[in-house]
Image: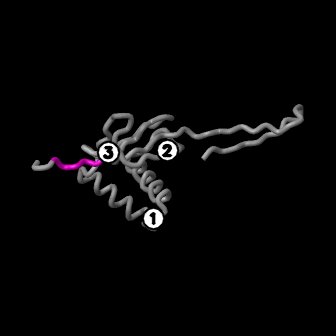
Amino acid sequence: MAALFASASPSMSGVHATVCAMPMITIADEATGGPSGAEWTMEIFDETVRLDELIRRRVVLEIAESGAGVDPEERTRATLEAFGRNGFVVLVDDRQITSLDDKVHLHAGSRVTFLKLVPLVGG
């Protein structure tokens, strides 16, 4: 959501509005061998964030948009455990982030992909 600031100038007869928008990133769900899933946009307030915090924010965003009555802390815990079991990988601008402690560098236009790993049939 953009912040709107209005200011009046004594030398001008009107009020001027200035819109200050936070940089936006794209969060996408994908699965190997399947169609792309949900996609969201999210404002970023920090350019550098740890992966575990980025996952927490993504979980909270998903719960808020779905309106599901799910406990965000419990869902975050389960999601972090799934990451630890290699249930999915996280790609930031096509670069894989391998540890929950890794710092992720984001910028306006970054794409964060949560790629669910689906086992091959027979393998």
Which residue position holds label 3? 35
Where residue 123 appears, x then y in whole percent? 11, 48
Q: Quadrant of residue 81?
A: bottom left
Which residue position holds label 1? 68
Neighbourhood count class around disc 3 (C-alpha, 10 Å): few under 14, some 14–19, many 20 upward: few
Amino acid carrying mark 3 in the image: Pro
Where residue 88 appears, x then y in whole percent? 28, 49
Q: 10 or 59: nearer the eye?
A: 59
Give the CA distance from mark 2 to mark 1.
19 Å
Residue lying furthest top in this view?
Answer: 11
Query: Residue at coordinates 49% horizontally, 58% vertically from top-left?
Result: 64
- Decide: marks 2, 1 in contact (CB < 8 A)? no
SS type, badge 1 = loop
Mark 2 or mark 1: name the one nearer the start of the chain: 2
SS type, badge 2 = strand
Amino acid carrying mark 1 in the image: Ala
Question: Mark on residue 41?
Answer: 2
Mark 1 or mark 3: name the one nearer the start of the chain: 3
Neighbourhood count class around disc 1 (C-alpha, 10 Å): few under 14, some 14–19, many 20 upward: few
Q: Quadrant of residue 72?
A: bottom left
Q: Does 102 sit left or right of 49 as displayed? A: left
